[in-house]
Amino acid sequence: MRQDAVRFLAALLLGCLSTTVFAHRYDIEIDPALALLQVRLCFAGAAPASLTSGSPRAVGYISDLRIEGVHSGARAQLRRGRIQLQNIPPGACLGYRVNLDRITDNRISYRSAGSRLVDIRTWLWRPERVPARTRLSFKLPQGVKVAGPWPTVGDQKHTFWLPDTPADWSGRVVFGQLKRTAVTVGSTDLDITLMGDFDRGQIDDVRTWVGGAADNIRRVYGNFPLADAGVLVVALVNGYGYEPVPWAEVQRSGRPEAHFFINQNAPLQAFINDWTPTHEMAHMLHPSMEWRFKWVYEGLASYYQNVARARSGQLTQQQAWQKLYDGFQRGLKQARRGFGGYMEVYWRGAAAALIADVTLRQQSQNSQSLDSALQQFGQCCFTPVTTWNGFAFFERLDRLTDSTVFSDVFGRYANSDEFPDVTPVLRELGIRVDNGRVHLTADGPWVALRTDLMTRPLLLSESQ
Ligand SMILES: [Zn+2]
């Protein structure tokens, strides 16, 4: 055999090996009623000392926990919210069942039109750190599909790699008669999974409003922030009012995904007019942050839901400033009452975002902005597995922009109950307010900056 042929065969063999060598392996079976999960976890080499689901609630759903085969002294037992493992021989397998019908909270388990959505923290017991090449493989009843926030193994539709995102991060898997589509935004292909009974026209509509919202966020710095992100659209069965998107959120286990729970019969224009899709997509601009910094990430999303929609022409500049102003007023009202409610949290952060954006633009003669700072952060520092402390995030943005704007502005409001006063910034931008009505005037030292902010992204390439 010629030498290059030997080399070719050796490469082929190595290629085969590299796709078949797994770390831990999960084999998961779901029954036709989509109520019962049978999980088998086989360890590659030594088993970890314990497994976690990432949620204290999961102990209420698991049963029939056992080590397969006869291994004297091997034990698996639930203790202090974890599965404690003792004397597990290398290569042994653990089995357990999870009864999804025991879950009553719609946010972590939801059924519609022959499908089921479930939070992975209810059933995916895993080591604290997931070794590379850990694999999940689903065995499904006839006609049932599965979608989760994980990359598939090669072209196997029902087998996935399990990334090592933190155990307590939320993520969802869906089973049933799912439909799939995608939209391309800049250089990102956004996969869309639809759960529910969607006809072709409705799928086209979903692509239109999801693609539109993602495209709005592309206008923050010229590209969609993430190369790999997903979208899940769930048709609510009933009883959630008439808003097009009564509930939506971003989940980050596996990969970042925006989840929209919708009234699918609402007209397309209602979805396009709704701020929610753009708000959720805006969460792709920042990393996971500790819960106590919720006001920061909700603020960034609330700020950009208006700025990005103005840039795409969905809102006029006047409307966008009015919406920001109205939001600040709602937040201020709650802050004055000492209420500490949702409006205060969201709009306190949005006010800080406006002040930081304008200050950075002023200090840099409009060569830097919140847009370019987030773009730089995305390029250097975004990892899909890290939860950031807010102060570390502000310091990193300072370092990237060679300023102290983020620690000064966000740091100040992180350490006090004070609601940010946007009055001086609005005045400088030539924005006058009479009886709650915003007027855009030519009278202010930074009027040109006001227009820039609402009309175009400030790209790094322009500022360098
Ligand atoms: Zn949000």
Image: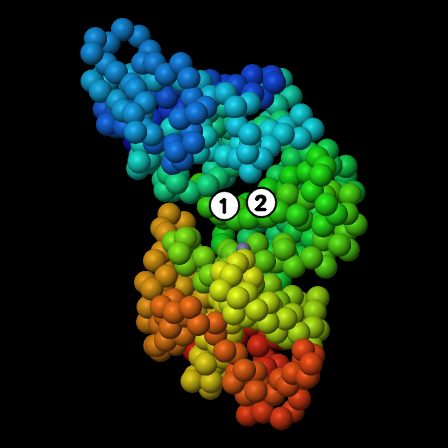
Q: Nearer the viewer, residue 259 or 402?
A: 259
The quarter of the rendering in which ligand 1 is drawn is: bottom right
> Whole-percent x and y of residue 2?
32, 29
Tag 2: amino acid: His
Residue 87 vertical position relative to residue 333 in the rendered view, above or below: above
Q: Give me the residue at 40% from left, 35% from top.
A: 55
| Position above or below: 94 against 426 | above
- Most foreground residue, 342 or 273: 342
Q: Which mark is residue 259?
A: 2
What's the CA distance linking mark 2 and mark 1? Answer: 7 Å
Q: In which quadrant is the C terminus drawn? A: bottom left
Left or right relative to 298: residue 430: right
Placement of the N terminus among the 4 image quadrants: top left
Residue beneath the point at 60% across and 42% down:
232
- The residue under label 1 is 251
Q: Quadrant of residue 80?
A: top left
Residue 253 x/y as whole percent? 44, 42
Name the kind of residue labelled 1 in the image. Gln
Residue 2 seen anywhere in this rendered image of the structure: no
Q: Is residue 307 left or right of residue 163?
A: right
Q: Is residue 277 left or right of residue 256?
A: right
Residues tagged 2 and 1 counted as in contact (Cβ below 8 A): yes
How far across and how far down the image is residue 209, in percent? 69, 53
* Location of residue 75 in the rendering, given as x and y in whole percent from the top left corner: 25, 16
Residue at image point 68% right, 38% down: 236
